[in-house]
Image: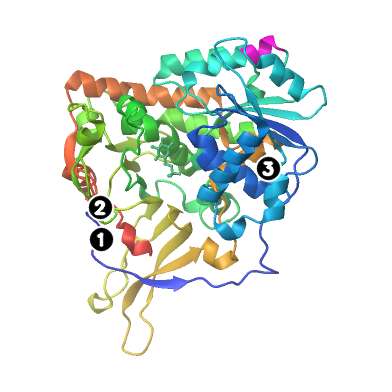
């Protein structure tokens, strides 16, 4: 990929904490019932059950809290516990599965067979929930086409109370109109304060660290604007392909699957004004302003501001892999598996600072990061022998290993005159604090119980994101902008490199943070 040729030296920031190194405090949450619709599905198996197990084994789930799987199939509580045990064995490290903790967790599990399209099972669920006052979180780990049906049945059977919450995941619509219709359908039964729209990127440690870095330090905020920042890059690169999700993915493509939600949320957190507090609406109001300030991309500028790509056969993760069309087995599709966009936030703080966004499947490496590229010093006081100062860069890596790296210039150590050298002040959280990095769902699932909506998307945010994305998709159709092919295992089509290089900039070279 097009990256800077030099490799800065790395300096690992070692602990200089004032006081003992502390990990976040674990405060038990009040007893709850989590009702997971789609309780035997893929999301429950890979993410929800493991996340709840971790929170339970850390002592955060206590008392009479229950996790109730709900799905169409007939199953006993014991069958469901068996399913959960297998899910944990498959998705949790063996050393984290302690028999007594596992028994305690499995003892909290129950199962009810319900059918969203008929009366079957709803009364059984109502009876199981009983009348005890405790938080009820209904998690819809099912396709959005039945969100409205489930919300309506819960309403008709009197299961929605003041302390009830609804958790939904993307896709929240596939355009503004369908997202709006979905929000209206659930809004008939749940108030906005009861609806938790998950974007799991907001639960990632580095994403929350971005807020800590910006708002808990006096250092960055005065520089966080167009007078000091040259541009921002947000990359979410995956090395995997379709993973059996062809049916969903081919209708979505990278822009709906990743940009409308995860990438725009990251952009909002970088670009938003400091909120008055971490209170949910203060944060979400600021994010909304960013979404509304995004410069419209339509048929008049789409060719210059966006690149679409689709992978063809190549190599990934050390082996040969098929192209997108072969994976699809349908022979033809113009769905993009890669997208790069030059976005602009048209407000006082960010005027003239491009935000280069890119995401794709079957890229060279799995890496997600946000790069804040500062401007160069206004005047170079050093002579030619010292070398030119390289502009500072802040790299926040979300995955694979969460880290923050600040590139700065120093004098090359030792005798021999003044030579400038770029070094990276590296801070790797797992290494530094010796803690297991929690999965994003762990934080988010319990935030639902606590009723904290700060890391969840509000209805108007989701709709504002579609309002920006819809014209891009229409413009692609209108102008006939087709996908450019890229070989699996590369960094996407060369047009994506040209998109940034036209502006005299290069994509950050991912390897350099290691
Ligand atoms: C999901 C997308 O929301 O996020 C997937 O639907 C994608 O296509 C996934 O693979 C990426 O999440 P993560 O946490 O693995 O980066």
Which label was assigned to residue 4?
A: 1
Comparing labels 3 and 1, the label whose residue is closer to the camera? 3
Mark 2 crowd level (few <14, some 14–19, many ≥20, 10 Å Cα): some
Q: Is residue 386 above or below residue 110?
A: below
| Residue 501 appears in the figure | yes
Gap in Å between the C-alphas at discs 3 and 1?
Answer: 51 Å
**Residue 201, image x and y in percent?**
49, 41
Judging by the rendered image, the residue that carries numbered circle 2 is: 506
Q: Are marks 1 and 2 in contact (CB under 8 Å)?
A: yes
Which label was assigned to residue 480?
A: none
Segment tinted magenta in the rendering = 153-157
**Residue 51, image x and y in percent?**
59, 44
Q: Is residue 291 above or below residue 440?
A: above
Is 368 placed left or right of 65 in the picture? left
Q: Viewer-proximal residue, 495 or 164?
A: 164
Mark 3 crowd level (few <14, some 14–19, many ≥20, 10 Å Cα): many
Q: Which of the 4 quarters of the picture holds residue 453? A: top right
- Magenta stretch, main secondary structure, is helix
**Residue 279, image x and y in percent?**
66, 37
Q: Viewer-proximal residue, 441 or 42?
A: 42
């Amino acid at each position: 990929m097009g990256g800077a040729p030099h490799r800065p030296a790395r300096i690992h920031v070692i602990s200089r904490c004032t006081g003992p190194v502390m990990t976040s405090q674990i405060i038990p949450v009040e007893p709850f019932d989590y009702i997971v619709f789609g309780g035997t599905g893929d999301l429950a198996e890979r993410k929800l059950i493991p996340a709840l197990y971790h929170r339970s084994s850390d002592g955060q789930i206590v008392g009479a809290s229950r996790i109730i799987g709900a799905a169409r199939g007939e199953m006993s509580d014991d069958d469901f516990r068996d399913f959960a045990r297998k899910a944990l064995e498959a998705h949790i490290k063996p050393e984290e599965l302690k028999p007594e903790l596992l028994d305690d967790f499995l003892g909290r599990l129950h199962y009810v067979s319900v059918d969203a399209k008929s009366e079957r099972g709803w009364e059984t669920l109502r009876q199981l929930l009983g009348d005890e006052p405790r938080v009820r979180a209904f998690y819809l780990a099912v396709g959005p086409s039945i969100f409205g049906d489930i919300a309506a049945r819960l309403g008709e059977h009197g299961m929605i109370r003041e302390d009830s919450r609804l958790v939904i995941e993307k896709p929240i619509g596939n355009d503004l109109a369908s997202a709006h219709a979905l929000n209206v359908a659930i809004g008939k039964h749940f108030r906005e304060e009861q609806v938790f729209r998950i974007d799991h990127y907001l639960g990632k440690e580095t994403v929350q660290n971005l807020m800590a870095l910006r708002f808990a330090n006096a250092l960055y905020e005065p520089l966080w604007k167009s007078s000091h920042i040259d541009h921002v890059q947000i990359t979410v690169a995956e090395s995997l392909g379709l993973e059996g999700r062809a049916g969903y993915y081919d209708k979505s493509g990278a822009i709906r699957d990743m940009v409308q939600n995860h990438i725009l949320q990251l952009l909002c957190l970088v670009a938003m004004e400091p909120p008055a507090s971490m209170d949910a609406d203060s944060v979400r109001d600021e994010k909304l302003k960013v979404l509304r300030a995004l410069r419209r991309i339509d048929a008049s500028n789409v060719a210059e501001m966006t690149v679409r790509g689709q992978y063809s056969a190549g190599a990934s993760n050390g082996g040969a892999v098929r192209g997108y069309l072969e994976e699809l087995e349908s022979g033809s599709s113009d769905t993009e598996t890669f997208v790069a966009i030059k976005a602009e936030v048209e407000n006082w703080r960010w005027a003239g600072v491009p935000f280069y966004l890119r995401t794709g499947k079957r890229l060279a490496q799995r890496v997600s990061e946000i790069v804040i590229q500062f401007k160069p010093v206004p005047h170079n006081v050093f002579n030619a022998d010292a070398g030119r100062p390289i502009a500072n860069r802040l790299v926040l890596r979300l995955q694979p290993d969460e880290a923050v790296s600040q590139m700065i210039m120093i004098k090359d150590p030792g005798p021999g005159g003044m030579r400038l050298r770029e070094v990276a002040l590296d801070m790797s959280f797992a290494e530094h604090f010796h803690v297991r990095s929690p999965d994003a769902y762990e934080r988010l699932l319990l935030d639902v119980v606590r009723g904290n909506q700060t890391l969840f998307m509000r209805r108007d945010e989701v709709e504002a994101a579609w309002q920006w994305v819809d014209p891009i998709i229409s413009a692609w159709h209108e102008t006939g902008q087709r996908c450019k092919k890229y070989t699996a295992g590369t960094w996407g089509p060369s047009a994506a490199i040209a998109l940034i290089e036209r502006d005299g900039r290069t994509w950050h070279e991912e390897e350099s943070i290691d």
